[in-house]
Image (tube, grey):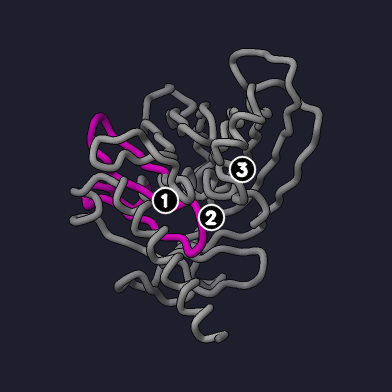
Amino acid sequence: MLALVGLWTLSACALEQRMAVDVIDAPLREKGEEVRSSEAPRGELRLGPYEVSSIVQRNTREGEALLSDVQPRPSTFFHLDFDLTQAQAGAVDGGSAESPSPSAASKPWHASCVAERRVAQNVDFAAAADEGHDEVALVCTLVDPKASRWSLRAEGDVGRGLSGEVRRAEPGTLAFSVEVLARRRFFGAVGRELPFPVVQLREERTATAAMLLDTPERAWFGPELGPERRSLALAVMVALRLLPLGETAFLR
């Protein structure tokens, strides 16, 4: 019986992942390089040669409003900090890599984020429809190993998805457009919520990076992304992974 339950759980997980992967642009899935999460110390995340550490998460009921339209509904503010390090040695092969070590690692990226999540306008209707429509806005500051600063801003709701952008602080040039996908259309029918969100980054109209915002994490990088742009893309996507964009993403 336990074996059957375990098999059913694995099958359900595989189906959910396939539903989420299918919303990623096909050229990125087919031509991009995929990396997958691997075993990491408690409180850390490892994707291929990248290691996410020093993760600090907390939430409060009070904070400066981030959502563009102020409404008298309860909000929770989520604070997130983490470091992202890439090993200088170790090749990615089929989603696996040599484990980074302190002596082989470069200086880390550092991310600091704040997100506001506000209760949906009609929470009873959303619950009856088995959908989440809490509104979310977030702001992140990303600092690379050379101390250059980047900003991530996005806004939307957890049931319909978010949109935003990543810009270099100076001179303010656009690095990526950000879309957090939460729904999928089946055969032209009404959109249906995904089991968990997916983030996709675009340069102009081309999808150049994507990541499943759930465990086990999987990410894709387009062949046109160099090492620095890839690290920036992953820092952005990890921030979205660790913030509360799904029903159970935060502190999971």
Residue 41 percent location from the top left of the image: 63, 72
Depth check: give the residue in front, 234 or 220: 220
Residue 249 percent location from the top left of the image: 59, 50
Up-down relation of residue 163 to residue 99 (above or below) = above
For residue 187, what is the image quadrant? top left
Q: Which residues are magenta?
A: 199-228
For residue 129, what is the image quadrant? top right
The count of marks equals 3
* Residue at the spot of label 2: 84
Q: What is the CA distance from the residue labelled 3 to the residue labelled 2?
A: 19 Å
Looking at the image, do the residues carrying marks 2 and 1 touch, with CB atoms under 8 Å apart?
Answer: yes
Is 210 inside the magenta-drawn segment? yes
Callout 1: helix, strand or loop?
helix
Residue 114 percent location from the top left of the image: 65, 34
Q: Reading the chain from its start, which is encountered first: label 3 or label 1?
A: 1
* Residue at the spot of label 3: 244
Residue 155 percent location from the top left of the image: 52, 26
Amino acid type for the residue under numbered disc 2: Leu
* Residue at the spot of label 1: 231
Residue 217, which numbered label? none
Q: Reading the chain from its start, which is encountered first: label 3 or label 2?
A: 2
Could you tell me if residue 182 is visible in this image? yes
Amino acid type for the residue under numbered disc 3: Pro
Q: Reading the chain from its start, which is encountered first: label 2 or label 1?
A: 2
Is 195 inside the magenta-drawn segment? no
Q: Quadrant of the C terminus?
A: bottom right
Q: What is the CA distance from the residue labelled 2 to the residue labelled 1?
A: 8 Å
